[in-house]
Image: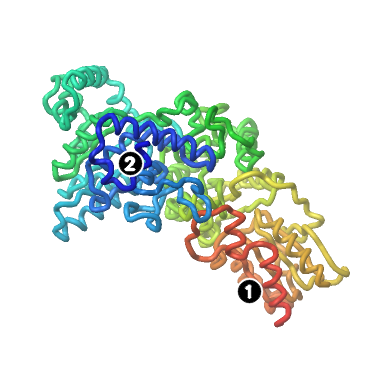
Amino acid sequence: MVLEEIGSPDDLRDLTTEQLAELATEIREYLVEAVSRTGGHLGPNLGVVELTLGIHRVFNSPHDPIVFDTGHQAYVHKLLTGRNDFSDLRKRGGLSGYPSRAESVHDIVENSHASTALSWAAGIARGHTIKGETDRTTVAVIGDGALTGGMAWEALNSLGDADDRVVVIVNDNGRSYAPTIGGLARKLDGIRTDRRYEDFLGWGKRTFENRGACRNFAYRTVMHGKQALKGLIQEPSMFDDLGLKYVGPIDGHNLEHVEAALRHAHEFGGPVLVHVLTEKGRGYSPAEKDVADRFHAVGKIHPETGLPIEASRFGWTKIFADEIVTAGHERDDIVALTAAMLAPVGLQPFADEFPDRVIDVGIAEQHAVTSAAGLAFAGLHPVIAVYATFLNRAFDQLLMDVALHKAGVTFMLDRAGITGDDGASHNGMWDMALLRHVPTLRLAAPRDEPTMRTAFREALDVNDAPTVVRYPKGPVGDNIPAIRTAGAIDILAEHGSGEAADVIVFGIGSMAGTAIEVAGKLAADGRNVIAASATWVRPVPDGLAELVAGAQLVITIEDGLRDGGVGEEWADAVRDSRVANAASVRWEHHGVPKEFLDHASRAQIIEQIGLDASAIADVARDALASS
């Protein structure tokens, strides 16, 4: 097998055309077989096999830095740079699902948040220019979906104003998580479907077959081909106007064309944009036939059919999907917004029912949030569904455009807390610590299906402030009913003699079950213990100070940052209260440490950071013993 002989990009340079074709086939077979066992991003990587081969044959990584945006299209890059063991992909100790500096000097940018690669490339290239390293070219591979992000256009504007050696490769497959939307998508689609381009491809294929392999074939066809092609190449004036030379569109699955176009771009010596057309899921029949893009990211699947090995359990996202459709039938002021993730965040059913009340802004979270403020001003109630980690990108807009203007906007934060196998950039662990600083913002952390549905409906009724409902990734556990309430706090379990509680354990959101476990362990020591939770954790729930007054120890558990998190805000509020015996209560806060967490399962990370019930109970015992 050719793939077994590839240990670094240098091993690609002497391969024949036939060997390269065989290598491309072997890579696709390997990816299907490996990713079907572990889960991961399959479709994007099947689409960039020839493109990645061409990049590594033309450029000299890591001397020529290669930046991927987003990193979910870097599996082929990993294989070609010596990482050929995918058996533990996205598992603790195995390969990351994104580029990782810890894995290889060939990996530059680890952050999998989209639309950032061009800014990275601009900075790297300018650094090379300042240092006089004129023999180095920086390569940025960006999907057409990521070009819907405003930051990418800020970078293009900067790149075109410089003369640094940068090659921007637009991997245009017409999709990000879903079909790419917006004016740019229409522009690229117009280029992609122009009859002159189709005629050129057919002519070029015939010419290539007649001439045989020619290293500079694509350069010659681009520069000296039919007159019709010249007009087509000149049409993307938006890039020329920005100061970038445009080459394309190139058939991204014709390695000779890809390689020759990249050589031409490399030799130019300034900022060049190469427009490459690819097919997501190329070479794998189930992915090629799929119109719903189920193969963008997969769990464990049967490689022959693409069907999941285990059926997905009813999840948090599905609850939201159901509830917003029901609410949409009851209220015609609800409008939903998404940032290029209609299906992943559960808005597809709402879009099917109310197509005129869904706005997909592309990968542009800042625009989504500020435009939601505008929708609220116009008399609607916007609902923004986004992964928790991506809300970070629009914090200023939430603060200054939504909160400052008292806009009634609801944010549904999917994948909040520890997500695990996608790694540091995808853990939604920052939101609660960030959002506690936003005046008037109300934050809910439901613990089960009933509290999730109720929190969403209550959020929709707030029209003078931002509301946030956060919920974790994955299946929903059993319902956790309250046995009684104390103000706005739900009492979930009580252990002891009926006297005042020695210990009160609060579980925030998905950690409510852990709080019940901790309470049980401490009760076994003979303590009077209460396990409690509150669906709305901000503002500080009514009745908190009265409930904890007189307790020896109050424990808070959250799957967000411990420092500056909900627990600390609650403790500060109780200390400032005038409730007797409340200010002197001892608190122990448990949450996620202020550090980036490597990829592993959620359970492994929970244990690693001491957020499991046994570890928390042990800390509590030490605290009680020393009090």
Q: Quadrant of the N terminus?
A: top left
Residue displayed at 55% across by 39% down: 299
Q: Residue furthest right?
A: 497
The crowd level at tag 1 (other Cα within 10 Å; few <14, some 14-19, many 20+) is few
Viewer-side residue, 559 vs 221: 221
Residue 568 drawn above or below residue 377: below
Viewer-side residue, 186 vs 26: 26
Q: Quadrant of residue 501?
A: bottom right
Q: Position of residue 508 (x, y in %)?
A: 65, 58
Which residue bears the numbered disc 2? 142
Identify the coloring. Answer: rainbow
How many discs appear?
Answer: 2
Residue displayed at 73% across by 70% down: 548
Q: Position of residue 353 (x, y in %)?
A: 57, 27
Residue displayed at 56% across by 39% down: 300
In the rendered structure, which amino acid carries the disc numbered 1? Asp
- Mark in the foreground, 1 or 2: 2
Residue displayed at 71% across by 61% down: 515
Left or right: 521, with 497 as reference point: left
Q: Quadrant of the C terminus?
A: bottom right
Can residue 8 be seen at all in this image of the molecule? yes
Helix, strand or loop at label 2? It is strand
Left or right: 430, with 136 as reference point: right
Which residue bears the numbered disc 1? 576
Can residue 181 be seen at all in this image of the molecule? no
Q: Quadrant of residue 489?
A: bottom right
Viewer-side residue, 135 vs 28: 28
Left or right: 626, with 189 as reference point: right
Helix, strand or loop at label 1? It is helix
In the rendered structure, which amino acid carries the disc numbered 2? Ile
